[in-house]
Amino acid sequence: MRLKPLFLFLLLFLSFSCSPQQKQVQTLEGNPVETTAYFSPRGGCREAVIDLINHSKRSIDVAIYSFTDRKIARALIRAHDRGVKVRVIIDYGNGKSRYCVGPLLEKAGIPVRYKRGSGGGLMHNKYAIYDGKVLSTGSFNWTANANRRNDENLVVIRNDSHLVELYQKNFNKLWKLARLTN
């Protein structure tokens, strides 16, 4: 049986555009540290972030350069509505974009702050801390383009309390320096 060229092209395209997640578990100080990597476009980055948000019980702290993805914003609003403490820091310049979801989050009662980078640069972080236990980080901006078009990555790290603590300290520092309004 001979396959049509279009079918072969589609099969190859799908196998390269939907990169599967890569998962690894190692033991650190007696705890199993789990890392999972996702790659966009269409490699599960957005879905992983939404899943982490949906499973958070107490807190979500987000430091993100660009945030225009309304699906992720709605997941944060649902988390806030169920009693999860949500705080978001967005880059000051990106916060001025008409597509930025900062105002949508603020309207829902979520505290949002806007931060310029140190020395006049960018607040270029892209991480979130969930319940003080799970960290997501990488190049993945929370935008539709990052999900559909860009080559980006997201790493989810569980059970590395030292690393999460370092990111939490950084977030708390940025939170104090960030502005309430854009």
Image (cartoon, rainbow, N blue to C red):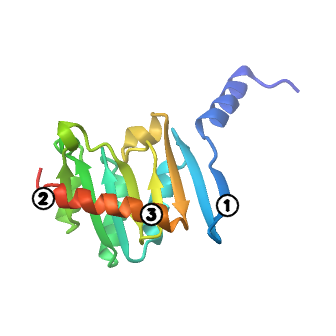
Q: Measure the C-alpha gap from mark 2 to mark 1.
A: 40 Å
Pointers 3 and 2 in contact (C-beta within 8 Å): no
* Residue sitting at x 50%, y 55%: 47
Given contact means CB atoms under 8 Å apart, are the residues at marks 2 and 1 in contact?
Answer: no
Residue 98 visible in the shown view: no
Would you call the spot at circle 2 few (<14 residues within 10 Å), some (14-19), or many (20 or more)?
Answer: few
User: Secondary structure beneath disc 3?
Assistant: helix
Q: Name the mark on residue 164.
A: 3
Residue 22: x percent and y percent? 64, 49
**Which of disc 1 and disc 3 is earlier in sequence?**
1
Circle 3 or circle 2, nearest the eye:
3
Q: Which residue is mark 2?
A: 180
- What is the x, y in percent for residue 3? 80, 25
Q: Residue furthest right?
A: 1
Question: Residue 96 is drawn in which quadrant?
Answer: top left
Residue 40 at x, y = what percent?
51, 40
Q: Quadrant of the N terminus?
A: top right
Q: CA distance from mark 3 to mark 2?
A: 25 Å
Callout 3 amino acid: Val
User: Tag 2's secondary structure?
Assistant: loop
Residue 144 placement, left or right of 88: right
